[in-house]
Amino acid sequence: MTKPAWLLLTLALATGLLGLNVTSQGMQIAAFVVSGIFAATGVLALIAGRRFKFDPVLR
């Protein structure tokens, strides 16, 4: 797993947990939307990281 993918998926988890702990419904919706955005970009980073691998033979 690449570092950006790890970071984005960790942020998605953190904002999702934050959304469970707020009292305002508007802030809860905002936290869940941001969590979904982080999760989607994390999945895209996973896909991109698998396609572009470092090949030491090409050096």
Image (cartoon, helix red, strand yellow):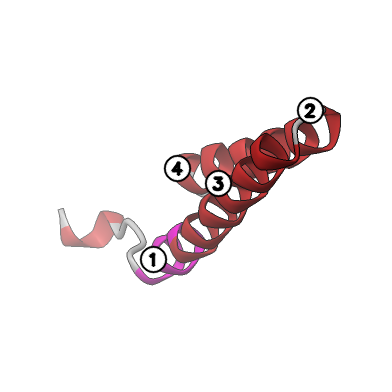
Q: Write the start and end of the magenta stretch as one range.
A: 45-51
Asked if the residue at tag 2 contacts the one at tag 3, i.e. Cβ–Cβ closer than 8 Å, the answer is no
Residue closest to the eye, 11 or 20:
20
The disc labelled 4 sits on which kind of residue? Answer: Pro
Q: Any mark on residue 4, and which?
A: 4
Residue closest to the eye, 56 or 24:
24
The disc labelled 3 sits on which kind of residue? Answer: Val
Query: Counting other residues with Cα less than 10 Å from the Cα at mark 4, is it few (<14), some (14-19), or many (20 or more)?
Result: some
Give the mark count: 4
Image height of 30 relative to 58, above or below: above
Image check: 44 left or right of 26? left
Instruction: Tell me how far mark 1 sits from mark 2, CA to CA.
Output: 34 Å
Q: Is residue 9 visible in the rendered structure shown here?
A: no
Is residue 49 rendered magenta in the image?
Answer: yes
Image height of 31 relative to 32, above or below: above
Q: Secondary structure at mark 2?
A: loop
Q: Position of residue 59 (x, y in %)?
A: 15, 53
Residue 25 location, quadrant: top right
**Which badge, 1 or 3, is on the more N-terminal residue?**
3
The disc labelled 1 sits on which kind of residue? Answer: Ala
Q: Secondary structure at mark 3?
A: helix
